[in-house]
Image (cartoon, rainbow, N blue to C red):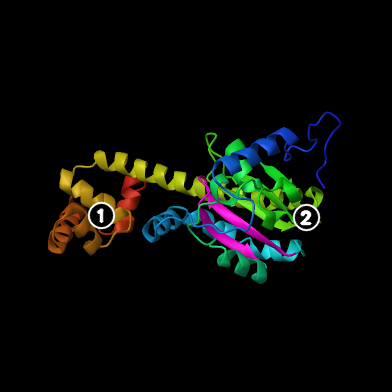
Amino acid sequence: MTAWSGNDEPFHPFLLTRNQIQQFHRNSGCAGLSDDDLHVQARLSESETAERLDRKQRLIQIAARQDGLWAGSFPYRHFVWLTDQDGCLLHMRGSADLLSCLHERGIRDGSCLRLDTIGTHALTAALDLRRPVYLNGTEHYKTVFHESASCAVPLGVQGGEPEGWMCLTCSADVGIAAMAPLVQAVRAVIERELASIGDLVHEAADEEEQLQLALEELPLTPREKEVANYWLLDYDYKQISRVLDISVNTVRRHIENMYPKLGVNSKSSLHLKLKGLL
């Protein structure tokens, strides 16, 4: 099923050369991995898994929102892995029977999907080469994948390092012409959302920085400026008291004292004062 040119160079950028595949197979064997049945035992601890999932929550939520896109655009039995930059499984979706088989083989959130656990696969090759990869049939090391095709792409590449990886696996009858465009389309949707959220985060950070600079110009004590900063960021009295380790009554007193100093009588008028509109 693999498309090669006459000089042993693949003509699609997702494909590998025969030499590359053979080297990945050798590395799989050298890692002590047999090519027979698949069972992944390498998995992060429960606490480490929870930490990874929390750290990548934004990516997981965006990817999970594309589940309907996969279901509506890809009629073949399949499964999709979402991993972090190191190959730790964060999210998995697909045909129920295939997901059940994967669970039986120990693959679940926190599983380490690397060359030494699943052998040559589009995901493990992509992790090593840091680029999109497509494999088909016996190009996979494990016999359980010999009837499969897999296609992996990086997600949210910033500064040369991806935020994670997405890998589609389905029947080997489904070629690269069907898989690669869909994977790229879903990737584009995810990366647009990541970029959009990133812009909002930067805007919020810029707004907070401008707020702090404006507060420095006000005739307030250092502690009043700290309280005002959190107050304008919509912290309530209890939250401010915990952050600054002072009592709720002290927070209330600081806010009551700063209003007459600045000639304002509410949080909204304080915002306007800082923006030079009052």
Q: Position of residue 253 (x, y in %)?
A: 14, 59
Seen from this angle, which residue lies furthest right?
6
Q: Position of residue 139 (x, y in %)?
A: 72, 45
Q: Residue at x 35, y 50 (%)?
A: 272
Q: Which residues are magenta?
A: 77-94
Tell me if I can see residue 78 in this picture. Answer: yes
* Mark 1, secondary structure of its residue: loop
In this rendering, position of residue 130 left or right of residue 215: right
Residue 35 counted in the magenta span? no
CA distance separating discs 2 and 1: 69 Å
Q: Quadrant of residue 104?
A: bottom right
Residue 19, placed above or below residue 212: above
Tally of marks: 2
Find numbered disc 2 in the image and state the secondary structure of the residue it sits on. Answer: loop
Q: Is residue 72 left or right of residue 262?
A: right
Magenta segment, prevailing SS (helix, strand or loop): strand
The nearer-to-camera label among 2 and 1 is 2
Q: Whole-percent x and y of residue 53?
A: 45, 57
Tell me if 247 is positioned left or right of 204 in this view: left
Labels 2 and 1 touching (C-beta < 8 A):
no
Instruction: Give the label on residue 202, or none.
Output: none
Tell me which numbered mark, 2 or 1, is placed earlier along the sequence: 2
Could you say where residue 95 lies in the image, as x and y percent from the top left?
67, 68
Residue occupying image coordinates x 35% and y 41%: 209
Of the residues shown, which amino acid type is indicated by label 1? Val
Q: Amino acid at mark 2?
A: Ala
Residue 213 lies in quadrant = top left
Q: Crowding near pointer 1: few (<14 within 10 Å), some, many (20+)?
A: some
Q: Mark 1 highlights which residue?
A: 264
Q: Residue 172, which numbered label?
A: 2
